[in-house]
């Protein structure tokens, strides 16, 4: 079998979820069809006892058509239609699997959340230090802390990219529950317009945001009790959570100094929106 056919077989196997035998049979019929099962066996080089099962599977997937007879013959469906149809079926299958997993998660959450609340109450009674090295873990913990803040949340960040939707949603949640949020951060001219609009909406909701060309330590303080530190360089790959009021007081003093140096972000964001 030529090198080009082997490349097609490899792609069909890796990208289209066909078995190696299915990919070989499909390519053989596509290039040399219509073929009988014996012809497929000879052209594709698959074991003879497997030939009928493989051809039946390809017909079921909409990639081949069968012409009844003695012997039957097989012809490839136009790949433009056949492969797209196969992809649609794969998509439906994946969506069903995702929906099943969501159902399992929804069923698990009540009991797992109860256990988590118990452990969280135990943690709150003592000073603690936690470290995360994965971005998803950091975002999950960070947004949870924002949503659960009792009175105030402050953030000083050197990160120059816009906040993610998860973070924006968490801040909106806190603001709607009458919590205070203050932020000092750089804002770049290169931000997409949709992110600028989202940030303006956040300000209009009540978030107090000031702009500063800041490149120092990124940190957040929650209720002057808990601290999150993002270890440079940015974006950080190492995040530290510390429940230590003494450290929170030191960082709040640092934050207040940055706050005085910064300027309100709203006029600058509105100016960016006016630009072509």
Image: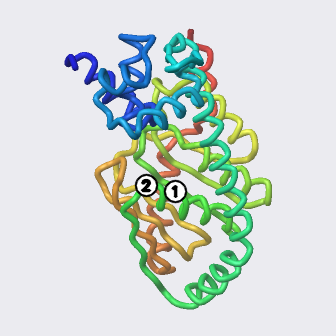
In this view, 136 is above or below 95: below
Q: In the rendered structure, are the residues bearing label 1 and label 2 in contact, judged by CB atoms less than 8 Å apart?
A: yes
Label 1: state its secondary structure. Answer: helix
State the residue position of label 2: 135
Q: Residues within 10 Å of mark 1 (few under 14, many from 20)?
A: some
Residue 251: where, in percent of width, then height? 45, 67
Q: Is residue 56 visible?
A: yes
Q: Of all residues shown, which one is farthest toward the front?
A: 70
Q: Residue at x 70, y 80 (%)?
A: 114
Q: CA distance from mark 1 to mark 2?
A: 6 Å
Residue 24: where, in percent of width, then height? 35, 27
In this view, 21 is above or below 238: above
The one nearer the camera, 60 or 98, is 60
Label 2: state its secondary structure. Answer: helix
State the residue position of label 1: 139
The one nearer the camera, 238 or 244, is 238
The one nearer the camera, 131 or 231, is 131
């Amino acid at each position: 079998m030529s090198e080009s056919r082997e490349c097609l077989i490899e792609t069909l196997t890796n990208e289209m979820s066909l078995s190696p035998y299915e990919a070989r049979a499909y390519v053989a019929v596509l290039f040399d069809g219509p073929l009988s099962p014996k012809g497929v066996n000879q052209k594709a080089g698959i074991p003879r006892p497997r030939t009928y099962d493989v051809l039946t599977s390809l017909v079921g997937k909409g990639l081949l058509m069968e012409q009844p007879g003695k012997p039957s013959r097989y012809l490839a469906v136009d790949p433009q239609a056949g492969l797209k149809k196969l992809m649609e079926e794969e998509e439906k299958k994946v969506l069903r699997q995702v929906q099943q997993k969501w159902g399992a998660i929804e069923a698990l959450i009540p009991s797992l959340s109860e256990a988590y609340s118990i452990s969280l109450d135990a943690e709150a009674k003592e000073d603690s230090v936690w470290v995360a090295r994965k971005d998803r873990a950091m975002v999950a913990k960070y947004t949870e802390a924002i949503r659960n803040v009792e009175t105030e949340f402050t953030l000083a960040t050197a990160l120059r990219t816009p906040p993610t939707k998860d973070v924006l949603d968490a801040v909106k949640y806190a603001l709607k529950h009458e919590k205070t949020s203050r932020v000092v951060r750089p804002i770049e001219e290169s931000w997409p317009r949709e992110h600028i609009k989202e940030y303006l909406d956040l300000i209009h909701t009540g978030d107090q945001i000031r702009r500063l060309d800041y490149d120092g330590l990124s940190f957040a303080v929650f209720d002057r009790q808990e601290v999150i530190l993002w270890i440079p360089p940015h974006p950080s790959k190492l995040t530290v959570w510390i429940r230590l009021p003494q450290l929170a007081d030191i960082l709040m003093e640092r934050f207040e100094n940055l706050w005085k140096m910064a300027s309100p972000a709203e006029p600058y964001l509105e100016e960016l929106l006016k630009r072509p």
